[in-house]
Amino acid sequence: MCQGGDFLNGDGSGSTCIWGYKSFEDENFTLKHDQPGLLSMANAGPNTNGCQFFITTAPTPFLDGKHVVFGKVADGMDVVRKMEATKTGYKGKDVPNMDVVVAQCGEM
């Protein structure tokens, strides 16, 4: 999977939401993590959704009931595969060795 959205710290530890508070509740778990290219909320447990999200690169059924699927990559799965192939390990963490930036993608 490819995770992003931590615009606070850039290392996966930051969380906030657009409504001005730290997190918001899970909406539903109707959609399943059954294919590559799904957009889902990253969280630290029930009802802790903030600014972080991830894109699946394979079916991940172990995430069902824990993370809310809210979208799907409509075009550009080749870009997701390039992001997935980016080497990680920056500062000894599971962080890309180079910046990966999403741009010109529509409204965010």
Image (tube, grey):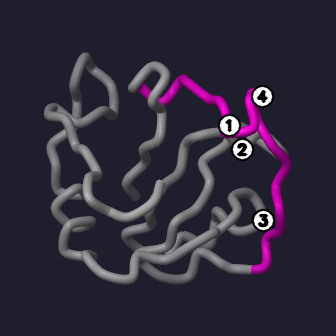
The CA span between labels 4 and 3 is 23 Å
The residue mark sitting in front, 2 or 3, is 2
The residue mark sitting in front, 3 or 1, is 1
Q: Secondary structure at mark 1?
A: loop
Name the side, left or right, on which 4 lies relative to 82: right
> Which SS does the magenta portion mostly show?
loop
Q: Which mark is residue 17?
A: 1
The residue mark sitting in front, 4 or 3, is 4
The CA span between labels 2 and 3 is 13 Å
Q: Which mark is residue 21?
A: 4
1 and 4 marks in contact (CB < 8 Å): yes
Kindly identify which residue carries mark 2: 49
Name the side, left or right, on which 57 lies relative to 67: left
The CA span between labels 1 and 2 is 8 Å
2 and 4 marks in contact (CB < 8 Å): no
- What amino acid type should be assigned to the residue bearing mark 2? Asn
For image coordinates 75% across by 37% down, the residue present is: 19
